[in-house]
Amino acid sequence: MITPEKPELAEIISISQDTADTKTFEVKFVDKSVGKKFKFRPGQFMMISVFGFGEVPISISSSPYKTNSIKFTIVNVGNVTNALHQLKKGAKIGLRGAFGTGFPLQKFRKKNILFVSGGCGLAPLRSAIYAVQEKKSEFGKISVLFGCKTPENVLFDKDMKQWQKEKFQVLSTVDNPNKNWKGNTGVVTGLFKHLTFPPETTIVMMCGPSIMIHFSLIELRKKGFKDEQMFASLERLMQCGVGYCSHCNIGNKYTCINGPVFTAKDLEKLPMKEN
Amino acid sequence: MHKTGCFSIKEITKIEGHANLDVELKDGEVEKCQLKIYEGQRFFEDMLKGRHFSQIPLIVSRICGLCNVSHLNTSIEAIENAFDINVSEQTNILRDLATNGEFLKSHALHLFFLVLPDYFGKESVLEFSKEENKFLNWGLNLKKSGTDIVKLLGGRIYQTVGIRPGGFTMLPKQEQLDKCLLLLEKERKTAIDTIKLFASFSEKLSFERKTDYLALVDSNYSFVKGKLCFASGKVIEEADMLKHIEEFIVPYSNAAQTSFEGKSFRVGSLARINLNQKALEPAAQDIIRELGLSFPNNKIYHNNTAQAIELLHLIDSSIRIIKELKLEKEPMQEIKPKECVGIGVTEAPRGTLYHQYSFDEKGFVKKANIVVPTNQNNHTIEEDLKEFIPTLLDLPQEKANLEIEKLVRAYDPCISCATHFLKVNWKK
Amino acid sequence: MEKKKVKVGFFSLTCCEGCEFAVLDLEEKLLKAFDYLEIVESRVLMEKIKPAAVKLDIAFVEGSVISKHDLDKLNYIREKTDFLVALGSCAAIAGINGIRNSLPEGIQERMRQKAITPVKEKAYPLSSFVKVDYILNGCSVNELEFLDFLNKVLHGVIPKLEEVPVCFECKLKGNACLLLKGILCLGPVTYAGCGALCPSQNAQCIGCRGFTKDANFDSLDNLFKEMKQSKKERFNLFTYFNPLPKELSVLKEEK
Amino acid sequence: MNYLLKKENLPKFLELLKKKFDQVIVPVKNETGATCFQPYSGQEIFLEARTDFSAKEFFRPAKEKTFSFKKKNSSYEIKPEYDTAKKVLFGVRPCGTHALNTLDELFIKFFGEDQFYSNKRKNTTIIAFQCNKACENGFCASMGTSKAIGHDLLFIERGNDFFVRAETEKGTSLLDSALFKHTSDSEYSSKINCENELDTEDIEENLFSNFNHSVWKEESERCLSCTSCTQSCPTCYCYTSNDEFVFGSDNESERFRVLDSCQLQRFTKVAGNHLFRPSREGRLRQFVLHKFSYYKKHHCIHLCVGCGRCITACPVKISLVDIANKIQKHSLEESK
Ligand SMILES: Cc1cc2nc3c(=O)[nH]c(=O)nc-3n(C[C@H](O)[C@H](O)[C@H](O)COP(=O)(O)OP(=O)(O)OC[C@H]3O[C@@H](n4cnc5c(N)ncnc54)[C@H](O)[C@@H]3O)c2cc1C
Ligand code: SF4
Ligand code: SF4
Ligand code: SF4
């Protein structure tokens, strides 16, 4: 019998520094049989334990088709994430999950896909982008929009180049550009004017700060996107990932089990801006 | 040490503030010896103005972190005297027990953490060798036997909460008392060893100066009741203390000094034993006899021995109290305030403590007056030093300082003041 | 945990020094902590202050800033240390010393004149003058909270203040609520961490750990009013350890 | 089977239980005057009314160790800490048995068994105690919780005796023949008239659709956010999980579940100090809606058993029944 709260040991097999405060960790389950059975959907998250420091929910940022190892892209913002950032290759951490709903990609066949991301929100989307890339023929046109504060915060440079090669539309924007910045400036919603494909046949997946999601929804609605077509991944305080602790409760939904991915239609019914 | 010149000792931390010592020597005689205490900076007496009487004990217990129970008890006595409250016998006994606990803690800390390093020629307990650390454990265990009692009765060791005018907010459980009892019985032997240890040390130090002594004297060696007795013979009522003791301001110090009939006097453990030896627990009297110690005496170093003797007395008296105690539930007494003045006098670990309050008809404080033991000893310390320093002239300054420190520490002016008492700066 | 010892110092400004002794009360646990700590300065444990050249990893400072002397000392400590902890109410919120701040201006003026050493116009917490990295509140500090802090720091955990009211811990302890028994209590507006020490002793919380950010002063004051407390009594209670909250400025009256 | 136990023999019975179980949990009055459940050690048993604090502590403790982690070489040993002590809970009221039933829905039947909870639950024998009069502020009649469920034995006060009915095998096995006498009497139910009444019809929909009703703001203005309500509630289960290093050890750490409260601002605080539910109004609404709306949506049962503890415990007399009734009335008027 399993305990939903029991972490499974995993080893960090590589670490890459993405930006000053963001690292991507590649990890592998220590118990091979666990690794073999492990499956996930893009948009799902796992609970990562750094023993002695605590547990945090982190989205998977690697491809669902490559589950030999799992990647997490993590910003150093507090205790647990800071402790994670101090770890070296070979260190052991705990993993639970994957939890949450994830993006229902199988329902998006034949559609154009628009990814809208802000800051570290690109991490969970990357998993979905990889999935789409893997089965490119099944989808229509792909567009990846990304916004962040400064050019130094731009994530996944290599991936972006690769996606461009795959003929995806890849646009990034920063709030505060420097001299070398050749991309756009301003908020991510400013990139919507570059969109080429019709709203009716397009699915939107987004992840980022709640303010970004809020304004993106408004702008996209104006462009004719319907609430059922738009999916957003949310963030709330989480302690368990399995609906036990109730911290992530928004209205009658739990972010951890009913989300973190919700359709805009769901969000309409939830008290998102509860004060 | 130069025969002529002056030196000052900066940053003596006090009971409630900081203090310096300034000494001026001329031809081997002390011209000037000033203990400058910046006490009073916290203005407790002013802060109490306008406060409700129920707040007094909790405010005054913050005067001193170490003898907070004494301040509590004294203010409670003053309040209860003012409003004619007679608490139950049980409450009185439990208060005695709490006082015992505090004395145990205070004496043990002073003896083992502050005085002992001196005797071993070490700067601090942190530098003790493995061998010497054994004594530290004695100290910790003795202290624990005291703190456990205070914790039990007051809820916390420093700034206790449960001891109030009218009674206790909460009574201890019998099983908890029994636990304290076990510990006390275990530490009895340590206390006896402690007396031997400190007696052997203080025997070697010979400084002696005849002076008067003051303490509360009672047939039960009580720290809260009794009559105020001077070694020179005078006996006064608690409430009249300030009528006989003159408090005077010295221009260089923030703290007042006191004198009795124009002369300085000592308070503290030595004063208590000098005046009230016969009321000590039998075992404590036996050991005095066994070791051939003689009280009354004028050797201030024997204040340390006296503290050690009190440790044994405190343990035995606490054991007796707990054994005789039959706890009964009782509510706190209700207090109806009226316009009046209340005075409380008790013995704190370092000597006689005096609190006086005048209240308005609703029980708010109009005026407060507090005389702490260190104030009373300051005068004597200065006079001792005047005699003592000339005997040190052959020593190098550093050694001399250490000797001065030892003497001041013997008074236990307050644990924190004694810690880094002397830092000498020579003035040219 | 690295084996290198952490250099700590204990300092004392104007206060009763109970906090440092409270720490000493950890007894064996403290001795165990000495395996990881090097005490560079301490009023209680040491006689002479070591030369000022050493940089401290953590400085614990108790007491409020009342005199110029205090302020100089505080600045000196801040310069010497990487991590400054305000130890106890006096250092964290001016505590009992702060009572004088709520005295009528006339008395305050007289106090200043009476003082022999120059004093500041009010009693201040450390944070009025220097950056304070962490607060261990309480009068006196809770030794277990201190230990927990040490344990965290020694393992590289960033300590975080618990933002819960005393009532939270009071209820965890299973105490009957004093407010319901008709006894005034500042538990609802005071930060926890003491294990609801006073209410567990059947005594009111007097707010020694400082008021919470989330406090509902108006409602609590209304409740006290319903409990037939005069303006003066309410003023006295709210200014026991804390400055009078802005919301309750109506309670202020010249006495 | 029905039995009688002389009232004076209750301590004897409890002593017997102590021999069979690791812990016998009984309702008592503690030193501060609050009534609560404690392990039995000869104290006086409190049976006059429901206790101020529920028996939650023995199923969802305030602080519960869940795992210990030990670093070995460069790996970790992960050990869950299950509480498998055999316990018997005596004197729990019908609302208390319903509270456990409610929590079972989440911790046993929902995601997979939470063994920290289920172990305690399975190893605890329940002896319920029937109420014969209404409790202060209670509204169990409205919640349908005035009859105990899932218990092993039921005690009913009757004159100088306790009328005892065994519901399970486990329960029967506890009945020592020297103390318990068979009786042919049958149970008679006394009807309880709660002073509070709550209209639960469509309550989950009505409360949720009145998310912005003015009552939330009005009532919350008084709220002290003291958490007395959530902590005395037998079904409030929200918790936080914390890791701690074992003091003085370099390679051992432990994980704890610590009871939390939705009435605290920090309940929704994430890194960067962002609060998702900062206002008192929002927090009070969360409490009431979780009770009567959200939980029901997921687990088909209300998260409130009508014990009224939260109302009694509130220093400023905020009542979830009043709030809910106000909105119910409002909805009724609207639908007309
Ligand atoms: C579904 C989901 C997916 C996420 N994916 C990523 C990701 O891919 N990359 C990334 O960098 N961050 C991600 N986050 C945010 C990440 O969980 C927080 O940054 C992290 O919990 C901060 O923990 P800390 O201990 O460093 O900070 P502290 O401030 O010390 O946090 C203390 C505790 O609060 C909780 N907590 C604090 N902030 C959050 C938060 N934002 N969300 C949930 N719990 C929080 C955690 O339990 C943490 O242990 C995700 C959050 C959620 C809910
Ligand atoms: S006694 Fe005080 S601290 Fe405890 S719940 Fe009541 S108000 Fe809060
Ligand atoms: S209960 Fe209140 S007054 Fe007592 S220690 Fe705690 S915070 Fe301080
Ligand atoms: S919400 Fe209130 S009435 Fe309902 S179960 Fe909890 S404490 Fe009892």
Image (cartoon, coloured by chain):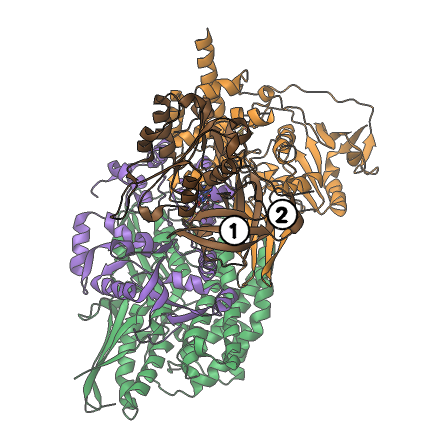
Chain colours: A brown, B green, C purple, D orange
Q: Going by the image, does D185 lie left or right of B331? A: right
Q: Going by the image, does B424 lie left or right of B186? A: left
- Ligand 1 picture quarter: top left
**Residues at marks 2 and 1, CA–CA distance in whole angstroms:** 13 Å
Name the residue type under label 1. Answer: Glu
Residue A26, numbered label: 1
Determine if the C-beta at disc 2 is less than 8 A from ligand 1: no
Which of C26/B361 is in front? C26
Residue under the point 31% across and 68% down:
B14
- x, y percentage for residue B269? 41, 73
Quarter occupied by residue D25: top right
At numbered mark 1, what does the secondary structure look like: helix, strand or loop?
strand
The residue that mark 2 highlights is A35
- x, y percentage for residue D270? 42, 42
Q: Quadrant of the N terminus of chain B?
A: bottom left
Dots 2 and 1 on the same chain = yes
The answer to whether one can see residue C173 in this image is no
